[in-house]
Amino acid sequence: MVDDRIRAALLIATLALPSVMVHGCDHGTSLGTGKGGQVSDAATVSPSIGGSGSDGTGAPGAGGQAGGTGGTRTDCVGDLAAVSSLWGWSCEQQLCSDVSRATNCDNLPSVNRAYFEHLPVYSAHRVRYELSEGMRKDCYYAGGVLVGAVAYDSGLSFCDGTSPVVVAVSPGDSVDFDATPSRTDLICRRGSDEGYFQGLPPPGCYDVRGECRPCCPSPPPDCMDKADGYPGYLCQRDGYCSCECRSREWRCYC
């Protein structure tokens, strides 16, 4: 009878404990080979976050998981909101918002350089933030929407001190963290005016290829006294139209 009471008390105490882990790969499912990992709640996330899961062997990733057995280590997995918010700022939910924010490295804590990368898959892009030696955060977008993030540290900072890398993918999506970009544009360099979008308005609108471009002024300008090509770049309207002054008229090419 005494043993039964003790067991019941222990069970009640266990059920009362708060859960602070978001998710992980406790059995290695769809994550290649290695130890699973968990990342704690986004409200308490820090570079030293993580908890290890059990050993397991899984197939290459699919759906909401990261996959592969070479290149970027993908067996330390965290919540997307937690990973994307590491080191003082978060990946924006929209690609063009993230690119616009990244045009000024001096406004981002610890960021030395930022790059806008065009990935091989149609409408897939990566914004890469380089911090100090060995530290980096990549934000992955598909169709202009955030679908994944990966953080690299110079030490074993994640998953109970077992990994220098933590990855995250939104449910239902997949990300190739080792994709070779077809083109890379420098967005900004700390303390410098270098960058693909420097001298232009923030690239807050999408063109027909899913690229980020400056938005057209609203209302449209009066082109009667403007030179052809004003404002000096093709701005974007409604996602599919590029506009400029031509022959004293505001013309849009859709």
Image (cartoon, helix red, strand yellow):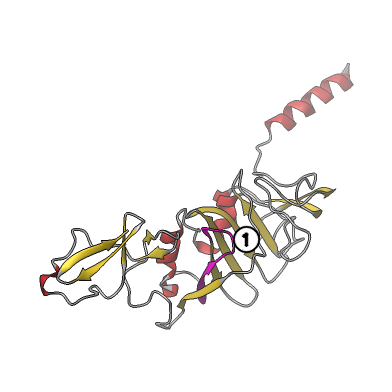
Residue ID for mark 1: 150
Identified at 53% across, 57% down, the residue is 141
Q: Is residue 232 left or right of residue 1?
A: left
Q: Quadrant of residue 4?
A: top right
Name the amino acid, label 1. Answer: Val
Q: Position of residue 28 (x, y in %)?
A: 79, 48
> Is 121 drawn above or below residue 129 in the view shown?
above
Q: Position of residue 186 (x, y in %)?
A: 49, 76
- Magenta region: 112-124
Q: Is residue 46 left or right of residue 206?
A: right
Q: Is residue 41 left or right of residue 31?
A: left
Identified at 47% across, 53% down, the residue is 93
Q: Quadrant of the N terminus?
A: top right
Q: Is residue 177 left or right of residue 56?
A: left
Identified at 65% across, 46% down, the residue is 64
Identified at 78% across, 59% down, the residue is 69
Q: Quadrant of the C terminus?
A: bottom left
Between 84 and 43, the residue placed more toward the observer is 84
> Is 239 drawn above or below residue 195 in the view shown?
above
Is 119 colored magenta in this rendering? yes
Is 88 colored magenta in this rendering? no
Q: Position of residue 155 (x, y in %)?
A: 71, 69
Q: Position of residue 44 (x, y in %)?
A: 58, 51
Mark 1, Cα crowd under 10 Å, few <14 / some 14-19 / many 20+, is many
